[in-house]
Image (cartoon, rainbow, N blue to C red):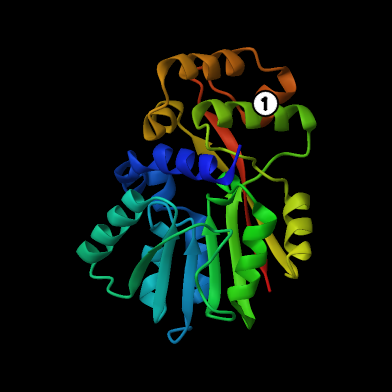
Amino acid sequence: MTRREHRTLVDSQFGTVSANYVASPVHAQGPDLEQLVGIVSGHGDARAIDLGSGGGHVAFHAAPHLSEIVAYDLSPDMLAAVAKEANERGLSNIRTQHGLVEHLPFPDASFDFVFSRYSAHHWRDVPAALREARRILKSDGQAIFMDAVAPDSPLVDTWLQSIELLRDPSHVRDYSVAEWRTLLRQAGFEPGGVTLRRLRLDFASWIARMRTPEPLVQGIRALLAHAPEEVAAHMEIGADGSFTLDTMTIRAR
């Protein structure tokens, strides 16, 4: 798949559901956002960027504590939804910018903070995106990445990636914590502390948020219903298809 094809796929997947992600309780709240606010508090002169901003919730939480935050995303429709919500909340220091994470249109050392939440698993070229993130971060700056992570078990990993892809064909990969550490070091970062969490996903809203076509929904249900005991236990698969996802916040300098 070429870069243009993947870019078109991501845009088509999220452009039509932008309002869903602005309103999504799963994305609008969580202890990872509370942790983020604690990190940026007291940095009122700092400038930040949120890579793959999606529904804008990182920007909405961080903006009151920063001088400016750029919500950067591939989907113009998503950015329009974020700008509208920011205006309604009176957050005038949120600026939206459209583009690819692998090619950031900003000078070197432009930002004090680089953030990304639930976006990197859609990136076509994570190493290139992380190199760009490192380039635009100041030498004394900090990067914070929050995402779903793959479990250590290859069996559970395979099952997770399969249902993710069926739900959303723009999915690339949920990386493991070990893979994240390696990718960050290769991009020039020094990985720091990792906070692991578990996130319960309601099947019905998880599917509705992406408007997954019914034949693919049935495919996901079939996989979940026939999951091996190890997979069912780790993912805590419920009778209705709801399951638990591993997530991570990792800090890097």
Label 1: state its secondary structure: helix
Where is residue 218? Give x, y as percent: 49, 14
Residue at the image position 34 percent from the left and 70 percent from the top = 94
Where is residue 68? Give x, y as percent: 39, 77
The quadrant of the image that shows the N terminus is top right
Tell me: 45 left or right of 78.
right
Residue at the image position 64 percent from the left and 32 percent from the top = 161
Residue at the image position 78 percent from the left and 33 percent from the top = 153
Give whichever of 27, 175 is nearer the camera: 175
Mark yes or no: residue 250 visible. no
Q: Quadrant of residue 198?
A: top right
Q: How many marks?
A: 1
Could you tell me the amino acid type at mark 1?
Trp
Question: Badge 1 is on which residue?
Answer: 159
The correct choice, above or below, for 244 with respect to 247 in the image is above
Residue at the image position 76 percent from the left and 27 percent from the top = 155
Outermost residue, left direction?
Answer: 88
